[in-house]
Image (cartoon, coloured by chain):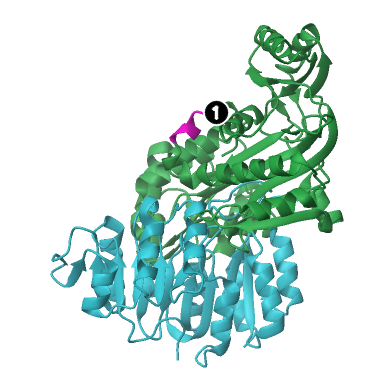
Chain colours: A cyan, B green
């Protein structure tokens, strides 16, 4: 079993004809992803590399190809609408890579998704990669991954690749790795995904990588204490970050004394999570729990 | 993006919210004219003269004066303009005051608090109000959280009248004040959404001796991601409030935050950039900066990044920490070698590469004949950088 996607998931790409969309579609296909369609309004009838049919709308692409998951590379001003289009077509999953979407748009997206079928990953994230099925819905460099039984959840991009590479170097393969994104308001969070990994018979342990800002890690800690029996290792970035400064990610800011790394580490440790002392020890910290 | 109090009040006024009469002045003569207009218009000789800087706690630092009469207002403006104001939020170096707000005095009967924020957990906008106005809301939240009233809403649905009534009654308002507060709160909520705000605060939100509601102090922050559809906001930017290096980095598409240490960092990705600062500290050093050059850095990027890092004269070593995913390590290594060659960098350089084509990248660094230390992992890179910054080379 796997979480969120499986071998049979059929993937469509929104924004497939843009530079990033086309490049990463080819990367995804090289990784083994089952890409069946692309969507760019006004370009129906064309094909990417004479292979992937392009449609005007997500609904058409779904009807013609049976696509059930979307990866979104649409520019920020139009990205929220692209997510809503995927949700309107009742896809099971939308993965939004786009950075720079206004928070107000994401609040509207969250309101619209409530009670619906579509799960959202991102935005401002590297997406999902599932080495056990070779499905990659995003931009994670697949060469650093290896199939295995460790789940990875992270708010970061390159730091996630770093953690995956450390696991791979130790011979610890991954079941599914998900970047949930660095924005203040996004889709699935740590607690949602921890619950899925807990139920997944093919995942033995989970690495979570958090950072300063917000309280998602504290919420995850409370959830772990109550509901998670599998071992969890964590790393929190930003112990040295000054208060009141946005550290690259829109969501990475300590404000009003809230959202510090120290608070998050304390909450996770109190919940029995082993927190890696440095970003170079994430793999070893997880290994020590097995 | 932050703006000044007077700008925040101007926006509120445009959304139908009553604010005391006031205008900004850049010199004492301008202040005098504005003060005269306010007194003539209101018949009230009490005036507030308030330093306009992007930091709170201005009163505590002597940046706010309540005076009687036009002459006194001019004198107060003269003393505040040009002063270096130190408040709990400016840091010990303080901020030079270039603008003052002249505002009509307000007869204060009650000081309340009203604020709007993005509630990241609820994924909604949260309206907060409290009877404890005039103090920082974080203090109220810590000491007496039960005194904070909250209502949540989605941008499209807006703040419903009944939600605004809950707040108005909860604040102990009565009679005509309730209807006035409902209108004000709904206008404020509309403003928050339409202006792509990330924070709006009225603190204190005042009930006057005549029982009217008014805005004594106002704070508005905007969502930087929404700048493309808020063209009017760019005019409100006060460049003197911004760190010049941070602004220069932002113009290049980098994210930079200056720190107090001596090890410059050049990293791709925000999470990895924070983690790099953390591991330098763990190794016993102090980072000079946070620098995220973006997920897909190239050779030209490296050169620009080095220029930004070296604009801080305290930097004694540079630690380049790159995880090459899409970006190939050999391409990056070539970029680093080219930048060092061209720029003649005179501080020790430690480069840690990982990811696609890493072996080739390391070969390029080793074969360059330049003094570039190559580290195999982040831990080793941080230790080397700390050692070299201490002069141990």
Disc 1 packing (10 Å; few <14; some 14–19; many ≥20): few
Looking at the rendering, the stretch of residues picked out in magenta corresponds to B231-235
Residue designated by label 1: B239
Residue A140's image quarter? bottom left
Residue placed at 68% from the left, 35% from the top?
B218
- Image position of B379 (left or right of B215): left
**Percent coordinates x, y for residue B125 in the rendering:** 60, 55
Q: Nearer the viewer, residue A147 or A46?
A: A46
Left or right for B96, reference B87: left
In the image, residue A47 above or below residue B2? below
Residue B327: image location, x then y, percent? 36, 59
Residue closer to the observer: B270 or A280: B270
Q: Quadrant of residue B94?
A: top right
Front-most of residues B378 and B326:
B326
Judge from the rendering whether residue A74 lies leftward or rightward of residue A152; answer left or right.
left
Label 1 marks a residue whose chain is B
Q: Is residue B254 visible?
A: no
Q: Tell me what residue is drawn at x 59 percent, y 59 percent.
A: B124
Task: Locate the C terminus of chain A by quadrant.
Answer: bottom right
Please say if A23 is above or below A5: above
Answer with left or right where residue A208 lies relative to residue B65: left
Q: What residue sits 80% from the left and 13% below the top?
A: B45
Residue B383: quadrant of the picture:
bottom right
**Can residue A142 be seen in this snapshot?**
yes
The extreme front residue here reads: B175
The N terminus of chain A is located in which quarter?
Answer: bottom left
Image coords of residue B236 (percent x, y): 53, 29
Looking at the image, is A220 positioned above or below residue B313?
Answer: below
* SS at badge 1: helix
């Amino acid at each position: 079993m796997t979480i969120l996607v499986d071998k049979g998931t059929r993937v469509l790409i929104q924004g497939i004809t843009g530079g990033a969309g086309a490049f990463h579609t080819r990367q995804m296909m090289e990784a083994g992803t089952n890409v069946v369609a692309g969507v760019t309004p006004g370009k129906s009838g064309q094909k990417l590399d004479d292979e992937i049919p392009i449609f005007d709308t997500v609904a058409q692409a779904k009807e013609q190809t049976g696509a059930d998951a979307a990866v979104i590379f649409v520019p920020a001003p139009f990205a929220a609408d692209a997510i809503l289009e995927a949700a309107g077509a009742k896809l099971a999953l939308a993965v939004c890579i786009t950075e720079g979407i206004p928070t107000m748009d994401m609040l509207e997206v969250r309101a619209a998704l409530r009670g619906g079928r579509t799960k959202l990953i991102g935005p401002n994230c590297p997406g999902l990669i599932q080495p056990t099925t070779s499905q990659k819905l995003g931009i994670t460099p697949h060469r650093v991954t290896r199939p295995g039984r460790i789940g990875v959840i992270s708010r970061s991009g390159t730091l996630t690749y770093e953690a995956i590479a450390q696991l791979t170097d130790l011979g610890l393969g991954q079941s599914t790795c998900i970047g949930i994104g660095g924005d203040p308001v996004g889709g699935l969070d740590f607690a949602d995904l921890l619950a899925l990994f807990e139920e997944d018979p093919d995942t033995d342990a989970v690495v979570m990588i958090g950072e300063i800002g917000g309280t998602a890690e504290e919420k995850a800690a409370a959830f772990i204490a109550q509901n998670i029996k599998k071992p969890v290792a964590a790393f929190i970035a930003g112990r040295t970050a000054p208060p009141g400064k946005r550290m690259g990610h829109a969501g990475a800011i300590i404000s009003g004394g809230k959202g510090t790394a120290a608070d998050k580490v304390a909450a996770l440790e109190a919940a029995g999570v082993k927190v890696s002392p440095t970003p170079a020890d994430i793999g070893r910290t997880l290994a020590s729990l097995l | 993006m932050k703006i000044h109090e007077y700008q925040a009040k101007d926006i509120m006024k445009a959304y139908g919210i009553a604010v005391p009469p006031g205008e900004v002045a850049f010199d004492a003569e301008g202040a005098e004219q504005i003060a005269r207009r306010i007194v003539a218009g209101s018949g009230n000789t009490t005036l507030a003269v308030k330093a306009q800087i992007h930091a709170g706690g201005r009163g505590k630092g002597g940046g706010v004066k309540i005076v009687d009469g036009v002459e006194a207002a001019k004198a107060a403006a003269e003393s505040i303009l040009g002063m270096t104001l130190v408040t709990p939020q400016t840091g010990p170096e303080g901020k030079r005051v270039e603008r003052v707000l002249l505002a009509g005095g307000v007869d204060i009967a009650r000081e309340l608090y009203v604020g709007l924020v993005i509630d990241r957990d609820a994924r909604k906008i949260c309206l907060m109000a409290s009877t404890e106005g005039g103090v920082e809301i974080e203090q109220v939240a810590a000491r007496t959280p039960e005194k904070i009233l909250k209502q949540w809403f989605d941008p499209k649905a807006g703040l419903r009248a009944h939600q605004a009534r809950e707040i108005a009654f909860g604040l102990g308002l009565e009679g005509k004040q309730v209807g006035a507060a409902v209108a004000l709160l709904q206008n404020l909520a509309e403003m928050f959404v339409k202006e792509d705000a990330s924070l709006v605060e009225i603190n204190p939100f005042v009930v006057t001796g005549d029982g009217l509601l008014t805005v004594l102090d106002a704070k508005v922050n905007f969502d930087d991601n929404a700048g493309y559809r808020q063209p009017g906001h760019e005019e409100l930017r006060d460049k003197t409030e911004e760190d010049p290096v941070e602004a220069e980095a932002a113009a290049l598409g980098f994210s930079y935050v200056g720190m107090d240490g001596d090890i410059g960092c050049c990293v791709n990705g925000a999470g990895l950039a924070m983690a790099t600062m953390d591991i330098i500290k763990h190794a016993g050093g102090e980072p000079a900066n946070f620098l995220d050059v973006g997920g897909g850095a190239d050779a030209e990027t490296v050169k620009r990044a080095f220029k930004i890092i070296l604009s801080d004269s305290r930097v004694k070593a540079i630690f380049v920490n790159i995880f090459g995913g899409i970006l190939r390590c050999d391409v990056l290594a070539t970029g680093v070698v080219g930048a060092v060659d061209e720029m003649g960098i005179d501080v020790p350089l430690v480069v840690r590469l990982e990811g696609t084509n890493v072996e080739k990248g390391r070969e390029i660094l080793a074969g360059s004949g330049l003094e570039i230390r190559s580290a195999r992992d982040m831990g080793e890179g941080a230790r080397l950088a700390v050692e070299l910054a201490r002069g141990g080379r």
